[in-house]
Amino acid sequence: MRLLLLSFSFFYLMFSSTAQELEESDHFNVNLDFETRTSILLSKMTLKEKISQLGNNAPAIPRLGVLEYNWWNECLHGVARAGTATVFPQAIGMAATFNPNLINDVAVVISDEARAKHHEALRNNDYSQYKGLTFWSPNINIFRDPRWGRGHETYGEDPYLTGQIGTQFVKGLQGNDPKYLKLVATAKHFAVHSGPESERHFFNANVNQRDLWETYLPAFKDLVIDANVYSVMGAYNRVNGESASASNYLLQEILRDKWGFNGYVVSDCGAINDIHANHKIVKTPEESAALGVITGCDLNCGGIYQNHLQESVTLGLISEKEIDIAVYRLFLARMKLGMFDPAEIVSYAQIPFDINNSQKHDELSLKTAQSSMTLLKNNGVLPIDINKINKIAVVGPNADNINALLGNYHGTPSSPVTFINGLNDYIGKRAEITYSKGVDLVKDGADGLNLLSDSIIEDVKKADLAIFVGGLDATWEGEEMPGGINVDGFYNGDRTRIEMPEIQQNAIKAMIDTGTPVVLVLMAGSSIALSGLEKELDAILMAWYPGQRGGDATTSVLFGDYNPGGKLPVTFYSSTSELPDFKDYNMQAGKGFTYRYYKGEALYPFGHGLSYTNFKYSKLRADKTNLNEKEIFKISFNVKNIGDYDGDEVVQVYIKDLESKLKMPIKQLRSFKRVSLNKGDEKIVEFEFKPIEDFSYYDADQQKYMVEKGSFEIQVGSSSQDIRLKKIIYVD
């Protein structure tokens, strides 16, 4: 009986169709290719049924054996909003690892847990939101400005780093089966989107062609061409006057025609409604619905398509054939996920549920968090020698704050380890620990004095070392919070100032004034200006939002059990005054956005991160120094660990155009590699480059990337500012 061979997901009792009817449904015939089966299914559907499938919550079609399906699922750094799951460091922390292979491992685990959860849900007749196989991750927007609240969802400010990390994340999610997709990953938000959150439903991002192609598009291109990402999500805002979720230029000319994208496009939630309601591009929801589908947005997160497309057809705004294109793309995706095949022939359907939140996955979360830890300053107080410490005073609002582990779009960890939990477990009875929250993250709801109590100050005075654990959490920086946060420094998800909240600054100053060495542990998702405190603090560790094992990871770094190797995927600015207008999408506005254009002096530059050991760079070699734009050339150099600890070094290669007639980036990251070296060891590191890819700029007139003839400087170093080796390459 064919029904017995069908996946357990197809519970025939749910449908009015008989077994014989289902048996004759050729779209279940596994001997046919997915494209043919999808076409057969489409041919059997009425217009009403087709339209019903174009929203994120798609109802069942019992007569065709189509189950209800919710397309909305999240897995930014672990399966989110679907119960207990392994929570990895927030995306910005994963970027700080500068380790794409590690992030691929993370994504494989996430996809394992997602598959296991999905099939367990089906066994329980659960078709609810967040239980599906189509995930709206990763966020690969460029973290243009640290004031943007959602920046911590991204992989930072650099297009190349974002593309490399994002590519491996997508590959890990979607799997490597030659026939089936493990999950569908979604590259979002296409394409020019980085605040302000409070205006995202009506904002128009004006962007010139060079910035579009050199900053905002490259990561998307990488994920489409190199990672074969199967879904792309449009942004809320307009881009040069067009709705990003209904832009013929973005969705058709670039995405499909230039890049060959063959998956489906989904709108951000409510973005199709914005077309008429807020952008005022058209006047009615029927026009918005038609425009969205015609320009290539196949799936509407929201109800505009489902509620208004029928009338759009009646009014002659769109044809059924145009609707068919979108429906076909969506069902082809479901076919490729194995939703219409017997479970026993879909390898991913066999992943057992008990792998979810397993010990192995927990250990990978710890490893990733450790790899993300970024040491910004150290005067020698770290690593802490436990044998020389009798008392440690811990103060700060993030020391026991689970929210500061999680960031946003997160799952539920079974046993989250906060900083104080991790420290207590590590120290045991070897030293005395005092702990007090001391102050709130932003404001003191009790008395507003912003002062530490006398008893806390006394504990700090008596301690051998004090640790302040502060920063932010996702209640202060994150997605649009309409009618929500509007206090000094914060507005509806974004920050209006990047300085550390005054209440925390005052607490740290009071601790420093005691004379006790003070270490600052920052948990946050973005650049924080320290208003001069960096000069007085003994050490600063950026822990990001480190995931479920954050406390253990942080402690292991502070005490030297793990040598930090993370690097900044964003620039740390000295003050808000260094930043251009938040709403200006011109990368060269003011003093410039990101290290590629910023003409000031950074507090801590892009790529910065210290180690407990030292690395020596030497012997930069190039197999050729004179070449044409199409030639490939190779460089190599030596890196040696000359310090006293084993450790990782992220070697970074930047390209600087020395004689361009155009306004070029100051420099651009073009390759990197995280290298592990035991003390005393030396390795040769090699990279390959091609001028047409690595030295190019986008010529708006000719609409293509071009290379200016002239000299280019290869810069090799430990950060964008700490350049150790240089070599000139000439392009004829």
Image (cartoon, rainbow, N blue to C red):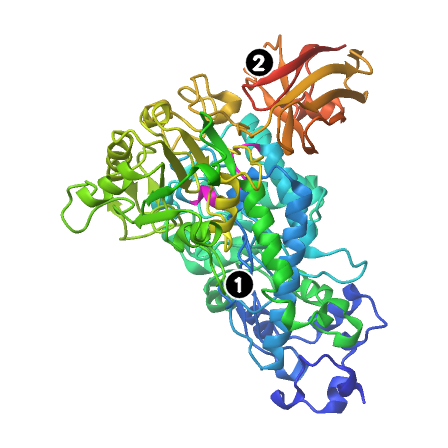
Badge 2 crowding class, 10 Å Cα cut-off, few under 14, some 14 to 19, many 20 or more, is: few
Q: Which residue shows up at 32% across the image and 24% down it?
A: 532
Please give the label number shown on residue 437.
none
Whether 422 is drawn above or below 161: the answer is below
Q: Give the range drawn in magenta.
A: 150-158
Q: Residue 659: which quarter of the image? A: top right
Q: Which residue shows up at 71% across the image and 71% down it?
A: 349
Residue 296: in sight, yes or no? no
The N terminus appears in which quarter of the rendering?
A: bottom right
Q: Does the CB distance between marks 2 and 1 fall below 8 Å?
A: no
Q: Which residue shows up at 70% across the image and 23% down it?
A: 640
What x and y, as percent, mark residue 174? Answer: 69, 56
Disc 1 is placed on an element classified as: loop
Q: Mark 2 points at which residue?
A: 662
Disc 2 is placed on an element classified as: loop
Whichever of callouts 2 and 1 sits on the residue coming sooner in the sequence is 1
Q: Name the residue under label 1.
A: 72
Q: Examine the structure image and report whether residue 675 is included in the region drawn in magenta.
A: no
What x and y, as percent, mark residue 383? Answer: 50, 35
Whether 303 is drawn above or below 556: the answer is below
